[in-house]
């Protein structure tokens, strides 16, 4: 029977979370909002619209949400040519592909950003499909991104594992009915990932690769 390994990308396979924090912080600052970086960090992993709503609340001027998202996109885009993959990210995907897993990316990124992330991972031959922000109506923590990824793989939830670095990932995977694996390289504490639904937690892709035999991806 076929199996699917679904991966978040930012903070899970590519070391970008703090670049996003800096870009969002500057976007908010330019628009006259003082949002602490630690709060931005906790919100990374949400879609742009959900992140703005989460951090600024319902009393904000919603007409300016698009400006904030555009500013973040422009600021973050400066890093596209040098996004750093996390240790053994590409090797992990390649190993799972050789072991018979269908590898699918489920990410809030799309367009040029997604292309830059895939270049950083450098494992296109191992990736069966990608569920991007362009393909779904609701981002994480809704189940839709993970469910869409499973649909692309043609694999039921009980034959899938979702790997991510945020509580939003763990909640999305849990709502989709898949087993969830957390990684600490996005900067979210182990206890928070476990509380949100992680069945197992590893340091980073290299640690997961070294521990495959005893992991949910065995």
Image: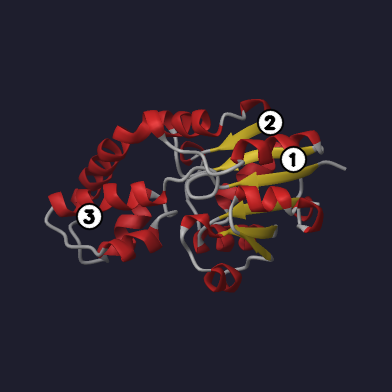
> Given this view, does label 3 or label 1 mark the residue nearer the observer?
1
In what element is the residue under mark 1?
A: helix
Residue 14 image label: none
Q: CA distance from mark 1 to mark 2?
A: 8 Å
| Residue 167 percent location from the top left of the image | 51, 64
Q: Find residue 97 and report its image quarter.
A: top right
The residue sitting at the right extreme is: 1
Badge 1 vs badge 2, beta-carbon distance below 8 Å? yes
Asked if residue 142 lies left or right of residue 22, the reply is: right
| Residue 123 percent location from the top left of the image | 62, 30
- Name the residue carrying label 3: 62
- Name the residue carrying label 2: 126
Q: CA distance from mark 3 to mark 1?
A: 43 Å
| Residue 106 percent location from the top left of the image | 57, 44
User: Which circle's residue, 1 or 2, is located before the other in the chain?
Assistant: 1
Q: CA distance from mark 2 to mark 3?
A: 40 Å
In what element is the residue under mark 2?
A: helix
User: Which circle's residue, 2 or 3, is located before the other in the chain?
Assistant: 3
Residue 152 can be seen in this image: no
**Residue at left 16%, top 54%?**
29
**Residue at left 46%, top 60%?**
187
Image quarter where the N terminus lies is: top right
Residue 122 can be seen in this image: yes
In what element is the residue under mark 3?
A: helix
Decide: few, some or many residues near mark 3? Use Cα within 10 Å; few <14, some 14-19, many ≥20: some
- Name the residue carrying label 1: 96
**Residue at left 76%, top 51%?**
212
């Amino acid at each position: 029977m076929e199996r699917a390994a679904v991966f978040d990308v930012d903070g899970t396979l590519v070391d970008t979370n703090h670049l996003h924090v800096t870009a969002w912080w500057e976007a908010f600052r330019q628009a006259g909002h003082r949002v602490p970086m630690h709060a931005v960090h906790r919100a990374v992993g949400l879609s742009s619209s959900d992140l703005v709503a989460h951090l600024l609340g319902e009393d904000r001027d919603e007409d300016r949400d698009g400006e904030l998202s555009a500013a973040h996109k422009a600021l973050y885009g400066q890093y596209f040519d040098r996004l750093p993959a996390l240790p053994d990210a590409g090797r992990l995907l390649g190993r799972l592909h050789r072991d018979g897993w269908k590898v699918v990316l489920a990410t809030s990124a799309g367009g040029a950003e997604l292309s830059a992330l895939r270049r950083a991972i450098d494992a296109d031959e191992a990736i069966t499909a990608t569920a991007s922000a362009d393909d779904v109506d609701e981002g994480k923590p809704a189940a839709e991104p993970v469910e869409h990824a499973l649909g692309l793989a043609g694999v039921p939830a009980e034959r899938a594992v979702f790997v991510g670095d945020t509580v939003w990932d763990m909640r999305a995977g849990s709502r989709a009915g898949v087993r969830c694996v957390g990684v600490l390289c996005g900067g979210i504490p182990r206890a928070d990932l476990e509380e949100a639904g992680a069945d197992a937690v590893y340091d980073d892709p290299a640690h997961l690769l070294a521990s495959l035999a005893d992991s949910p991806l065995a």
